[in-house]
Image (cartoon, rainbow, N blue to C red):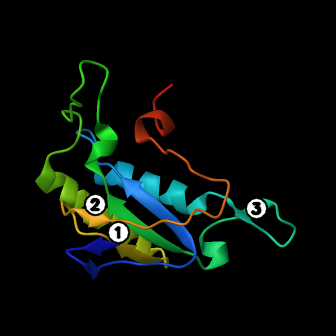
Amino acid sequence: MEVDGEIVGAIKNGASVLVGIGQEDTEEIADRMVKKMLALRIYPDENGKTNLSLADTNGSLLVISQFTLYADARKGNRPSFVKAGPPDRAEALYEYIVQKCRDAGIRTEHGVFGAEMHIRLVNEGPFTMILDSEELFAKK
C-alpha cells in the first residue's frame, strides 16, 4: 500500500481488511469484530480444508481505513456517507482496531487514515467476506 509514492504497509500471506467505522461503532463492538475476524477458520489445513485461523497460519493483516463502505446509493446518483462515523472518532477507533490486532500477536500493517492510498492485492483464495457488526451482533 502506497501513500504519496511511499510504501506504508505490506504483507505477504494473510488478509487485507477494509475497515469502515459507522456512527454507532464503539470499542466494545471493535473488540468483538477483531475477535471474530481473528478466529475465522478460513485458511486451509494440510488436507486443504478450511480449518485454520489467521493465527494458526502465522498470517499477517493489512488493515485499511475505508469510510466509503458506508456509502448509501439507494437514492440518486451521488452516494451519501451520513452513516459513516465522524472522522476524529473513526480515526481513533481505527487505530484502536490496529492495536488490538497487534495485541493479539498478529503482525499488522496499516494505511494512513484519510489519505489517498494505492493498494495492490493478490487474492489467493476463495474468501472475500463482509463482516457487518450490525448483522453479526444484532439483538434477536
**Nearer to the camera, 74 or 135:** 74
Mark 3 sits on what residue?
51
Q: Residues within 10 Å of mark 2 (few under 14, many from 20)?
A: many
Q: Residue at 30% of width from left, 54% of height from top?
A: 27
Residue with the most extreme right position: 47
Per the rendering, the mark at residue 94 is 2
Percent across and percent down for residue 131 are 49, 45
- Would residue 51 be found to the left or right of residue 118 on screen? right
Q: Quadrant of residue 88?
A: bottom left
**Nearer to the camera, 136 or 59:** 59
Q: Residue at 21% of width from left, 63% of height from top?
A: 113
Question: Residues under labels 3 and 1: Cα distance?
Answer: 24 Å
Q: Circle 3 — which element?
A: strand
Kind of residue at badge 3: Asn
Q: Residue at 30% of width from left, 26% of height from top?
A: 73
Question: Residues under labels 2 and 3: Cα distance?
Answer: 28 Å
**Nearer to the camera, 130 or 135:** 130
Percent across and percent down for residue 92 are 20, 61
Percent across and percent down for residue 138 are 45, 31
Q: Residues within 10 Å of mark 3 (few under 14, many from 20)?
A: some
Say which label, 3 or 1, has the lower sequence index.
3
Q: Circle 2 — which element?
A: helix
Kind of residue at badge 1: Val
